Image (cartoon, rainbow, N blue to C red):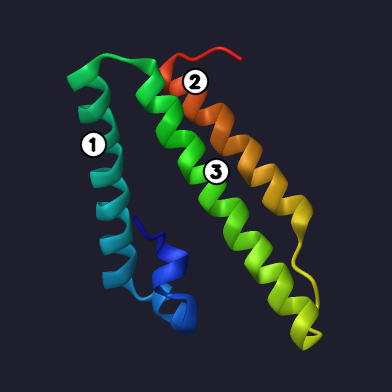
């Protein structure tokens, strides 16, 4: 599943439109419901961990690709401190929601 940033990568200004914001919120709610449904269906924390790890790997791959593009074209490097902080927050949030204790 593509993230919102991936979909609007070339036209990020559209994310500020009220209709798009509502659509993004709706999609996030649906994603949460899908994950919750999968968890309830199997009642298995392994599925939640697997889903979380897939999202983390996908994010890491996107960051690596972005880094290569920055090096190739000589652009300013992204703020990796914020990226790492967001990643940690995502992991802890999902673990708390799924009652997975690290």
Identify the residue shown where x is 47% and y is 66%: 5
- Disc 2/disc 3 C-alpha distance (Å): 16 Å
**Front-most of 98 and 62?**
62
Quadrant (top left/top right/bottom left/bottom right) for the C terminus: top right
Q: Position of residue 69 (x, y in %)?
A: 69, 78
- Disc 1/disc 3 C-alpha distance (Å): 19 Å
Q: Position of residue 36 (x, y in %)?
A: 26, 28
Q: Which comes sooner in the sequence, label 2 or label 3?
A: 3
Identify the residue shown where x is 26% and y is 14%: 43
Disc 3 secondary structure class: helix
* Circle on res. 33: 1
**Front-most of 41 and 89?**
41
Q: Position of residue 30 (x, y in %)?
A: 23, 45
Q: Residues within 10 Å of mark 3 (few under 14, many from 20)?
A: some
Q: Are marks 1 and 3 in contact (CB under 8 Å)?
A: no
Instruction: Kindly report which numbered mark, 2 or 3, lies closer to the viewer in this rendering.
Output: 3
Q: Position of residue 92 (x, y in %)?
A: 58, 27
- As displayed, is residue 35 above or below residue 31? above
- As displayed, is residue 38 above or below residue 100? below
Quadrant (top left/top right/bottom left/bottom right) for the N terminus: bottom left
Identify the residue shown where x is 56% and y is 32%: 91
Q: Which comes sooner in the sequence, label 1 or label 3?
A: 1
The reply, left or right, for residue 17 in relation to residue 56 is: left
Residue indicated by mark 2:
96
Q: Which comes sooner in the sequence, label 1 or label 2?
A: 1
Residue indicated by mark 3:
56
Disc 2 secondary structure class: helix
């Amino acid at each position: 599943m593509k993230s919102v940033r991936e979909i609007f990568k070339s036209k990020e200004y559209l994310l500020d439109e009220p209709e798009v914001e509502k659509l993004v919120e709706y999609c996030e709610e649906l994603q949460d419901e899908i994950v919750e449904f999968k968890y309830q269906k199997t009642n298995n924390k392994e599925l939640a961990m697997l889903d979380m790890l897939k999202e983390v790997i996908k994010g890491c791959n996107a960051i690596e690709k972005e880094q290569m593009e920055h090096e190739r074209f000589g652009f300013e490097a992204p703020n990796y401190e914020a990226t790492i902080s967001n990643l940690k927050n995502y992991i802890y949030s999902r673990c708390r929601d799924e009652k997975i204790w690290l």
